[in-house]
Image (cartoon, rainbow, N blue to C red):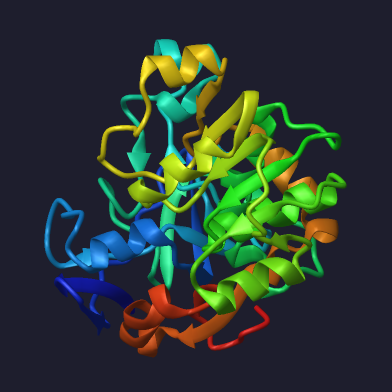
Amino acid sequence: MKAAVLTAPDRIEIVDDQPEPHCGPYDVVVDMDGVGLCGTDLAVFHGRRRPPAMPWVMGHEGFGRIAAVGTEVRDRQVGQSVVIEPNYACLKCADCLTGLTSACPHRAIVGLNTPGVLAERVALPAHFSHPVPDGLTGADLAATEPYTVALAAVRRSGVTAADRCLVVGAGAQGLLVCLILSRLGIEPVVTEPHPQRLAHAERLGATHDDGRTGFTYVFETSGHGPALGPAVERAAPGATVVLIGLNAQHLPLTTDDVVRRQLVIRGSMIYDHPGDFTTAIAELSVARPGAVVEACFPLDEAQQAFAGAAERAGKTWITIRGDQDA
């Protein structure tokens, strides 16, 4: 079968001899319709994160239709449309048993420590495939996993409609946070140097940065280290700073900053199984997260999709079946 594999940094090739997936007793096999691209994928593509082996099947934000179910699976059926939750927690460790599956040290992380889903068919544990309603576009389904990340961050933050919010960055994650905050009745202020991304955020209900201060919530989505310090300086006393973007730099904060201003620093890592995905899917028909998508490419043009993704104002996804409304 066909798959998009990384063969060297910045180089993806389409192969047609990828082995067919094996359906274990607790698995499903999914005929893939499409896969979204995110910053993690681009880090692997550009060589900033090294996969365990080469060639390496890319992608993790996948969706499709169930083609086969394992002998012990009772709650999934052939033909169901599903999105993939691409972090397979063990569901047995101390973190999983407390509900914090996002911290599971044994997670199989699709596209990072286990092969990706940018292939015609993939096998996965059945309970990490989530049935979705009919009537959604391919763009909506390609954006479901990152929408769940953003929704989990907003849930964990405790933000309310009365809060004043600053969103740092208007990449896909920032756009999705803006979309969710707008649905809560908040008009977030967004700071973003890319004019097309800023315009995209404004179309989703955000307003441009006019230099105001006194924000009760700051959502850092960019992962750009130098952006955090100036954003925190604009937070009100007692504000909550939610960190979603990742980077390896030390925080530009001192204990004096945090204690004297009584700040709450809250990290938000992906989502927790199964509740965050269940909540996100229940909202898809209204939320329509595909609004953050800009571009779609066929599988044979995966190289172009990856190479230009960082420069696009919205999210990119790859269609595997050739139908952009899959």
Identify which residue is drawn at 47% across, 18% down: 258
In this rendering, position of residue 93 left or right of residue 131: left
In this rendering, position of residue 253 left or right of residue 11: right
Name which quarter of the figure residue 14 lies in: bottom left
Question: Which quadrant is the C terminus positioned in?
Answer: bottom right
Identify which residue is drawn at 83% across, 60% down: 285
Compare residues 237 and 171 and report the one nearer the observer.
237
Identify which residue is drawn at 19% across, 58% down: 48
Question: Which quadrant is the N terminus positioned in?
Answer: bottom left
In this rendering, position of residue 121 left or right of residue 166: left
Depicted 10 relative to depicted 146: above or below: below
Question: In this orientation, does residue 74 appear?
Answer: no
Compare residues 309 and 193 and report the one nearer the observer.
193
Depicted 45 relative to depicted 326: above or below: above
x then y, percent, for residue 22 = 35, 54
Name which quarter of the figure residue 25 lies in: top left
Count of numbered circles in the view: 0
Identify which residue is drawn at 39% across, 15% down: 255
x then y, percent, for residue 214 = 68, 36
Depicted 293 relative to depicted 236: above or below: below
In this rendering, position of residue 292 left or right of residue 5: right
Compare residues 309 and 67 and report the one nearer the observer.
309
Depicted 187 relative to depicted 264: above or below: below
x then y, percent, for residue 119 = 38, 71
Question: In this orientation, does residue 163 appear?
Answer: yes
x then y, percent, for residue 253 = 37, 27
